[in-house]
Image (spheres, helix red, strand yellow):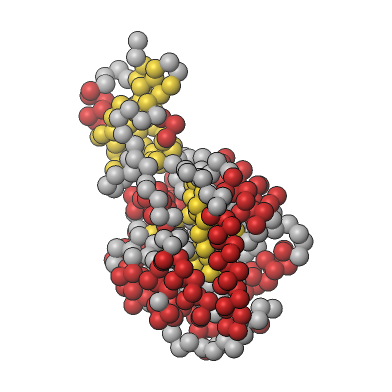
Amino acid sequence: MLNYKILTAKNIYSGLGKPVDKSAMILQEVNNKESIVAIDKLDLMASNFPNTKIEDVGFAISPKLVNPHTHLDLSQMSFSPGAYSAFIMKVLEHITTGKRGLESAQIGLAKLKAEGINTIGDIVTSKEVMHYLLASEMQGVAFWEVIDPDPATAEQTFNRLVAELREFRKLERPGGMKVGVSPHTPHTVSAPLLQKIAALAKQNNMPIQIHVAESPEETQLHFEGNGPLMDLPIAYKDWQATGMTPVQYLKKLGVLDAKPSLVHMVNVTEDDIKDVAKAGCVVVHCPRSNTALDCGRFPIELYAKYNVDIAIGTDSLGSSPSLSVEEEVYAAQALHGAKTSAQALIWSAVKGGYRALEMKTPKLGRGDSAELIHVWKKIKNEEINKN
C-alpha cells in the first residue's frame, strides 16, 4: 500500500521559475523512503488526493539552501556590533588570541550542517582550513583571501598567490569544494595586485569574491582619503583618494570584467548598480551584518529595478548572531518591508546563492528523494511575514 502526504507552505520553490504561494508538494513513502510525486496548487492537490493528510510546514519548502558568504575561521569570535572600523579592530584583536583557525572553522561548519546547509562560500585565511574544506563533504567555493595594499610588493604577492592556488587546486575533488580567490577589499589590495588577480581569475575560470562598498567609512576613504579606516593598523601604502565610489574604482581597474561576486554593496549609487548589472556580477546581501556594523540599508529595490542577481549570506559570527540563512531572510523581510517580497528573498537564498558560487541550482521534481528538499523553520514572529 502506498502512503501519501501533502506538505503545504506559504511558498514552494522547485528551483525552476519563481517561488509559488498557496502551493503544495505530494510525497510518497515506499520502503520507509519518501519521494516527490508532484508540486502544484494546494486546492488541485487536495482534489486529486482526497483524504490525504495535509501538513502545513509554515514559511517555505525549497531545494537545499546555500550560504555563499561565510568566515568560518571566525566562529569563536564573539558577536561584536558597532561601527565597521571598530569591528575590524576587534577582528585584529581576536586574531591575537589564536582562535582563528581550524578549530573555529570546524565549529562553524558544524553549525551550518545543523542548519541543513552543505553548500557554502567561505573566505579562507590559512592553509590548514583550506585543506580541511577541500577534503570535507561540503560543496561550494573556498575563497583564498589576499591582503596587500602595498603596490611595491604586488608582483611578489601575486607570484606567491599563483603558487598557493596551484597547490590548492590539486586537492579539488569531483563534487567537492572548489578553490576561488578573494582580494579582501578595494582598499586593502593595491591596484596592480587587484588587476593581476582579476585577470588570473578570468583566464582560469576561477570564482572570485570581494567585499565592496560595505560601510560609509569606505566611501569616505575613497572620496576624501581619510577617516576611521586610515587609523587602523594596516599599512595603506601610498593610498590616495580615488575620487570615485569603490564600485567605479573596480570598474576602472577592469576587475568587474572577471564577474566577481560582490559582498555587502550597501553604500552604492544607482550608476554603480547599473554597472554591476551590465557586468553580470552577483551581489551577496548580508542584512544582519550590515545592521550590526552600522553600514546602512542595502538598496534592494534598486537592485531589483536593474535585475541584479542577489544572494543571501551571513558573514561571520563576529558580525552576525548566527549562520542561519533562514534567519537572514527573515531579517531582510523585517528590514526591507514592502520594498521586496518573500518570493524574491527565497529565490535569493536558493538560486542567487548558487549563482554567486557559479553552481547550478538543484531542482525538485517527480521522483526526487525528499532528502533533497529543505523545509524552512516556522517563523516565531508572524508579523515578519506580512509583505
- The quadrant in which the N terminus is found is top left
As drawn, 234 above or below 240: above
Regarding residue 112, the answer to whether it shows in the image is yes
Closer to the camera in the image, 217 or 383: 217
Q: Residue at x 36, y 30 (%)?
A: 368
In the figure, is residue 105 to the left or right of 176?
right
Residue 225 sits in quarter: bottom right
Residue 226 in percent (x, y) is at: 58, 87
Q: Quadrant of residue 81?
A: bottom right
Residue 134 left/right relative to 359 = right
**Looking at the image, is 375 positioned above or below residue 170?**
above
Of all residues shown, which one is farthest toward the right?
97
Residue at the limit of the structure toward the top, as seen here: 1
298 vs 19: above or below: below
- Give the residue drawn at x 34%, y 40%: 363
Give the percent coordinates (x, y) of residue 240: 54, 89
